[in-house]
Image: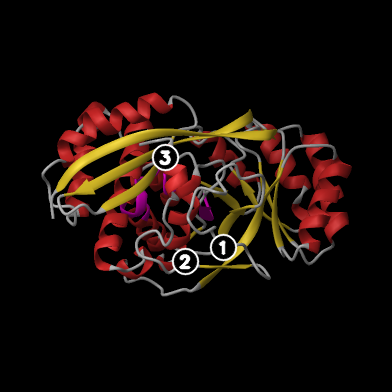
Amino acid sequence: MKIVDVRAYEVVGRLQKPWQIATATMDSLVAVLVRVETEDGTVGWGEACARRGAKVTKAVVEEILRPVLLEREAFQIEALWDDMLMTLRSRGHTRGFLLEAMSGVDIALWDVMGQKLGWPIHQLLFGQGRTQVPVYASSVLIDTPSRMAQEAQRLVHDGYSAIKIKVSGDVAQDLERVLAVREAVGECINIKIDANSGFDAPDAIAFAQRIKTLGVYWLEEPLFLDDIPAYRRLRACTGIRVALGEGEFHTSGFRVFLEEGLVDIIQPNITRAGGFTGVRRIAALAQSFGVAVAPHTGASGPLCMAATLQLAASLSGFTVYEFMYLENPFKQFFDHPLPEPIDGKITIPQGPGLGVRPAKEALAGLL
């Protein structure tokens, strides 16, 4: 079954209230959707992460990857993935726009296979067979300690036993935020902290040492991912559980963190780290080091959530799903809404491919 067309489309979801994190303020969610069509008319959809420069990602899909894919067998996904990477790997491109664009194509190819065979992707992957997965609520955004505490308390009232809060990179202010949230939710709630690379090494160490007694489950990306020496310093000075990886793309990027024991939980994003094929390779590497996988979703587009659910149902070493409870401007994108968590778990859609299909109304403005 040969591939006859590959197209990319920019989508933008405007937020009514901007999201404030340590290193950015977001007033919209942007992604690139990838459409792959085969000779029998089967269509698969994927998503490429595109926080900035969506037109660049679109161009990579259509000008660099499309020629590699046309007239190739759609089911030969591993070979196609390797050939897409080889277009620019010798030029040093194993990250960034190339891998993000490849992610959208790979997800679409797996969706094609699911549509053709009538199976959800998690069954195609012959994985763990999960019908539900545990979730945490993501994320309580940066605000005053009292407002963040109130929001966390509301999430607990809604049934979440695990929540993630954002911090800014200011040790004193962030400590107040964590203290307020812990007092508001009690000792039994799992609190995760996401710094979005907002600290430098000394402050990350100071913050990690001061929150030790507050029962924080993990500290997520306290430092920029390219600052390996800083992560070495953090590990040497504190015993806090470190989670990272939303900004990594390839096994080569994760390898140094795993080999040096700098990470406890990895968080590849399926729309950035090479789709199902890329993340499965990363997860296999992590498993060889005994490190769990908690895939990142975050400020993504509509298909990321659906694809990550399929991944979570199948992935060996999976630990928890990041459910974005915040405003979702893409909520009406599918013909049937994605499931919502109940009692801390979310059900895996069982339809073919991604489990859900884009609504005709949602596609009308794209095609």
Relative horizontal placement of residue 49, taking residue 14 as reference (left or right): left
Q: Amino acid at mark 1?
A: Pro
- The CA distance from mark 2 to mark 1 is 8 Å
> Circle 1: is it few (<14), some (14-19), or many (20+) Cα within 10 Å?
few
| Kind of residue at disc 2 | Pro
Q: Is residue 7 above or below residue 59?
A: below
Marked residue nearer the N-terminal end (3 or 2): 2
Looking at this view, is 13 or 84 the one in front? 13
Neighbor class of circle 2 (other Cα within 10 Å; few <14, some 14-19, many 20+) is many
Quadrant in which residue 215 is drawn = bottom right
**Residue 17 versus residue 333: which sits nearer the camera?**
333
Q: Is residue 235 visible?
A: yes
Q: Secondary structure at mark 2?
A: loop
* SS assignment at label 3: helix
Badge 3 amino acid: Ala
Residue 268 visible in rendering: no
Query: Where is residue 8 shown, x and y percent of the image?
Result: 33, 35
Choose mark 3 or mark 1, whichever is in front. 3
Ranked by sequence position, the earlier of labels 2 and 1 is 1
* Residue nearer the viewer, 87 or 332: 332
Residue 283, given in percent of the width and then of the height, sits at 39, 57
Residue at x 27% of width, y 55% of height = 112
Q: Which residue is mark 2?
A: 349
Tell me how far mark 3 sits from mark 2, CA to CA.
24 Å
Which residue is disc 1 drawn over? 339
Q: Is residue 36 within the magenta segment?
A: no
The magenta segment is 263-279
